[in-house]
Amino acid sequence: MTPREHEILEIIKTKPTIEQNELASMLGITRSSVAVHIANLQKKGYLIGRGYIINNGNYIVGIGAANVDVHGKSKKAINLHDSNPGHMNTSAGGVTRNVSENFARLGGNVKLITAVGNDVYADKIRNECISAGIDISHILKVEDHASSTYISVLDENGDMFVALSDMSVLQEMTVDFIHSKSSIIKGSRLITCDPALHPDVMEEILNLYSDTIPVFVDPVSCAYAETIVDFIGKFHTAKPNILETEILSGMKIKSKKDLYKAAEKILDKGLKRIFISLGADGCLYMDREGKHIERKLAPVEHMVNATGAGDAFMAAVIYSYINAFTLDKTLDYGLAAGIAAISHEKTINPNMSVSLIENILKERKI
């Protein structure tokens, strides 16, 4: 920060709604000069948006996918190679964006770094992020490119039957672009990301920041899990399912004993903590200190949409980490957030909140 920028920031701290003309008069400089200094403070992360919100450093950064989710749920058992009557809905999605929104709805402060195209889907992504309270001032806009899209077909029970995704716009986020956001990333308390990023970008994030800032990752899918096998040990926390755990560990899981062994193999690579999703059976937690806990809540009677459960779980784990919750409370919050997610047709339950999680725990804690 330059001396003049520091001077302007101190004035804004005492009078956040001050006009640029008034600032110019106080400092004896032109309004256009003030505008340049304000823009620089925003680029460096000291100010957020147009309202001169002071950045106090108490935030996390999400770096990864943001897309539009199109879900179709069949009314009856799916017949292949045929048209199946069902119900459709569209919402903003993307693993990192979903985690960011859930975290924001829990009361957290989050900045999203992602890439969108120049289309109506980009507008939908921005609008839903703003509505949820996510800072989107660091999104990369890629001209003449479609925004990321995810299409899923759910069976009559709300479970995923098949899905397709096009995240190619995210490959436009280069290492140089990540370097341009270094001041924002350095000021964060935690980084959450997903392997839809280009492997070079993911590796650069880990090389630059993992020694000083905890980096949390959701492997997303078997295909994406393959891209982080070589540097899984640089992450602080990972949240794979069983299939992704097989890929990260390099072994098949056919029993409970295999599951524990696979988790140990991943932790031996350097990962500090792992939360393995077990579906209806809850979650297995293990860490490098030797702790291991299996946890589950009473299952829901009717699942509406399974798509966003893992993202909600991860957001609650991050919220718990930021607030220094106990391990037991962390697991409870993660599982309850997952139940909140599968109880709503949208990828993100718009009612997500700490009070909702607490209510679910009162009803379903075993």
Image (spheres, rainbow, N blue to C red):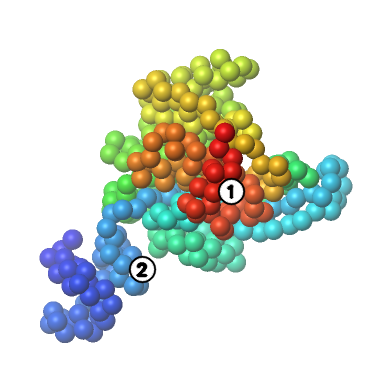
In the image: residue 347, left or right of residue 207: right
Q: Which residue is mark 2?
A: 49
Inspect the image, locate mark 2, and give the three-letter code of the amino acid beneath it. Answer: Gly
Inspect the image, locate mark 1, and give the three-letter code of the amino acid beneath it. Answer: Ala
Residue 144 in sight in this render:
no
Q: Nearer the viewer, residue 35 or 267?
A: 267
Number of other residues with Cα within 10 Å of mark 2, as a class: few under 14, some 14 to 19, many 20 or more? some
The structure residue drawn at horizontal position 53% and vertical position 63%, both measured from the top left corner, is 128
In the image: residue 344, left or right of residue 327: right
Q: Nearer the viewer, residue 79 or 365?
A: 365
Q: Quadrant of the C terminus?
A: top right
Q: Which residue is mark 1?
A: 340
Query: SS for tag 2?
Result: loop
The structure residue drawn at horizontal position 32% and vertical position 47%, both measured from the top left corner, is 189
The structure residue drawn at horizontal position 49% and vertical position 53%, both measured from the top left corner, is 355
Q: Answer with the quarter of the image where residue 233 lies.
A: top left
Q: Is residue 309 above or below residue 126?
A: above
Which is nearer the N-term, disc 1 or disc 2? 2
Mark carried by residue 294: none
Give the distance between the C-alpha atoms of the residues marked 1 and 2, in whole angstroms: 31 Å
Q: Is residue 232 above or below residue 13?
A: above
The structure residue drawn at horizontal position 48% and vertical position 26%, both measured from the top left corner, is 293
